[in-house]
Image (cartoon, rainbow, N blue to C red):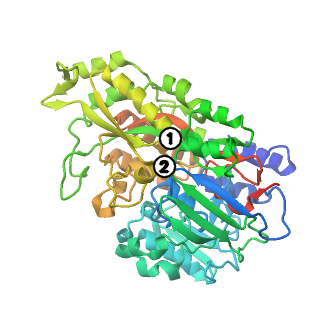
Amino acid sequence: MSEHEIRALLGDVKVGHLSRRSFVRAMIGLGLGAPAVSQMLPAAGVAQAQSRPSFTPSKRGGGGHFKALWWDAPMLLNPLLAVGLKDGNAARLFYEPLVSFDSDGQMVPVLAQEVPSVQNGGVSKDGTVVTWRLKQGVQWHDGKPFTAQDVVFNWEYTADPATGSPNLGTYRNVKQIEALDSHTVKVVFTQPAPYWNVTTLIIPRHIFEPYRGARSREAPNNLKPVGTGPYRFVSFKPGDLLKAELNPAYHVANRPFFDTLEVKGGGDAVSAARAVLQTGEYDYAAEVGNVEDDVLRRLETGAKGRVAIAFGGRITHVQLNQSDPWTEVEGERSSAKTVHPFLTDPAVRGALALLVDRASIQEQILGRVGQVTGNFINAPERFRSQNIRWEFSIDRANQLLDLAGWKRGTDGIRARDGKRLKVLFQTATNAIAQKMQAVTKQAAAKAGIEMELKAVVASSFFSSDPANPDTYTHFYSDLQLITYVMGPPDPERLMRVFTSWEVATKGNNWQRYNVWRWRNDEYDRLYRSAETEMDPVKRAALFIRMNDLVVQSGVVIPIALRAKAAAISSRLRGIEHNPYDVDFWNLAFWTREG
């Protein structure tokens, strides 16, 4: 699309002939990074996006008690140590970012006074410096002021390897973050940064500074948050119940609406959906996309609520462990110093990819909550590779294994050089994932591969506890089925999980996302190039090459682009179901009728 055509579209937005949402999606589809798109509309004189509440209340509170279910129960409330979505979403009740992405994929200010741009002086023309102007008058829940020093501290805390934060890689190309004054922060990058929004949820310096580094896990406030958000902490039973109350000093006038709230954890996704859609006992249930679509449709007939569905970049996939989960090296299984006994064999990896029956998974399991795919990156459209084709063929899988010398034994299980093709295949406990496991196991048996299935309670599988051997980052199995959340409408953070510097190890408390322990020099070079490529077309091409490399290598088997789905009471208002952020991203603006 030419510059003239883009300017014409901006003009259409300005006069109301084209919606902001359509423009943003079109630009992201062309490969522009979300921060760049967010700069374009203000530069053209289009007002900055704001939250869209259903009504403007005349006072704070008065909404009574709000009840939510998160069946994958939170265990930790420090967002900078969380590796699971459940912990990050719970932390969002209390902590806030400088900016959020709305459901259109556009940045909106939260703790920032405005979204930085070249036009307002917040982003340097060469993309190496970003200046954040912070919102005035914001207080932490204990009454202390929120300042630029808190933002600087979050960089110092996260970027310290001894802290063990999974967000360490976010700051990899940050040279310096400094406070220019009490409410201005300057971020200096080592090189041009097309995706420059490196900050996450902000924690307070005065609370966590004594626990930076090796003492990070000792902080009492990992379980007792002190944030700037619309609700203040009351109590927390990890894996069970979280309670909060209205923040009377919240920095948005007449918000929030609810006086108290609770988030109940545990149980299963079906029961959570039923408690909102059928019985009306709860107001909201998160992550019900793990319920089969036909079950959700039946529950919706209860007329107490609806299922909200939105697609971003969530990808359900099978991970193939490249390390040996059955050999311990220096007190560590699945050590990067080991090699898997047969999952490094291209024939085995290729056969496994042919044994995933995506068509049956789509028709019999997913319905409207998933779209089968062979790509790891599926959105925005510009980043979707046209080079990948998926196939289900038990015959071809058998041929590959035959040619590679994997012979069937008397029990039908293949072996070579004394190694049997027997794998432990694990996932988190939920109906959809476990049915996908079963479909794959059935096909694998016909190819001479024995699969033992394991389901780990979700609160344990997605735990941030380094002492828990059942977490997905420990990966103490041969295969695991999991869904990764892309978050912002840009693949940079999602694809960082395959880089060599993101390998999860005992040394970093398994707080990294390359759980495959896969290392590839070509991939690292492509990723480094994409980090600094300012041309959106060239940048998109780099991510497509990365997608093709990981899929064709066989270390990952993409299955489906998954919807973010939630069960919402028909009485709730103001919810903006958002695939680019956590469920509670705009909870301050939720209300309830009747």
Q: Quadrant of the N terminus?
A: top right
Callout 2 secondary element: helix
Instruction: Check whether the beta carbons of the residues at disc 2 and disc 1 lie within 8 A of each other.
Output: yes
Callout 1 secondary element: strand
Task: Residue 263: give x, y in percent of width and height.
Answer: 59, 59
Above or below, comparing residue 326 to residue 127 in the picture: above
| Residue type, numbered disc 1 | Ile
Q: How many marks?
A: 2
Above or below, comparing residue 99 to residue 477 in the picture: below
In the picture of the structure, the residue carrying the numbered disc 1 is 315
**Does residue 254 appear anywhere in the picture?**
yes
Mark 2 vs mark 1: give the one in front.
Answer: 1
Residue situated in front as seen by the camera: 201 or 389: 201
Q: Residue placed farthest to the top in the image?
A: 395
Residue 31 falls left or right of residue 84? right
In the picture of the structure, the residue carrying the numbered disc 2 is 494
Task: Residue 190: give x, y in percent of width and height.
Answer: 46, 66
**Does residue 173 appear anywhere in the picture?**
no
Q: Residue at x 76, y 54 (%)?
A: 574
